[in-house]
Amino acid sequence: MDEIDRNILNEIQSDFPITSRPYQEVAARLNLTEGEVIERVRRLKDAGIIRRIGGNFHSHRLDFTSTLCAAKVPPERLEQFVEVVNSYPGVTHNYLRDSLYNVWFTFIAQDMESIEQALSEISKKTGIDEILNLPAVKMFKIKVDFEV
């Protein structure tokens, strides 16, 4: 990764243009060509440096609800559990932790009933009975940019 790659990452992580040709706008900001930006973003994505490019929504402003979930998953069942959890479109993040509750994920849906139903389905599909549903009591939203 060179300085140009770092500049592209810094530019797109929180200020991605919503236009018909966003890479052209990024290119203009950085004095590059649109093709160069597209190729570099493609290469960074293929290398796993960029995981995804997409919108980030405030779920509560859309009248959705969210929760943090935690599960105790034996090591031999981790892969299957994570695959099932990640198949739900409402799952936005999934973390492996070194603790008794070793899989943590966030879930967003139209209402808590939908989340509870999905957690029940996940439990039935995976055989993991203990999945904690930990909705936020108070929301703290911070903006995080990672200077590259």
Image (cartoon, helix red, strand yellow):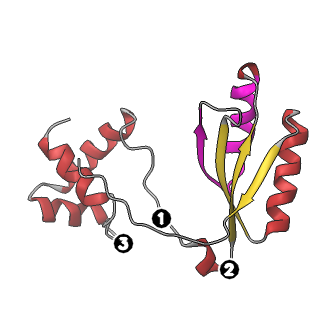
- Count numbered badges in the picture: 3
Whether residue 36 is visible:
no
Q: Which residues are magenta?
A: 77-97
Let me know if residue 88 is in the magenta part. Answer: yes
Cα separation between marks 2 and 1: 17 Å
The spot of residue 78 in percent (x, y) is: 71, 27
* Identity, as a three-letter code, of the amino acid under mark 1: Gly
- Numbered badge on residue 18: 3
Tell whether label 1 touches label 2 (CB within 8 Å): no
Rendered position, 75 above or below 119: above
- Please rate how many residues cluster around mark 3, counting C-alpha atoms within 10 Å: few if below 14, some from 14 to 19, many from 20: few
Mark 1 nearby-residue class (10 Å; few <14, some 14–19, many ≥20): few
- Residue at 35 percent across and 70 percent down: it is 20
* Viewport quadrant of the N terminus: top left
Dot label at residue 63: 2
Whole-percent x, y for residue 114 in the image: 82, 64
Q: Amino acid at mark 3?
A: Ile
| Image quadrant in which you'd find residue 87 | top right
- The residues bearing labels 1 and 3 have C-alpha atoms spaced at a distance of 10 Å
Q: Identify which residue, 144 or 54, lies in the foreground.
A: 144
Q: Circle 1 sits on which residue?
A: 55
Up/down of 113 relative to 83, above or below: below
Question: Where, by quadrant of the figure, is residue 76 drawn?
Answer: top right
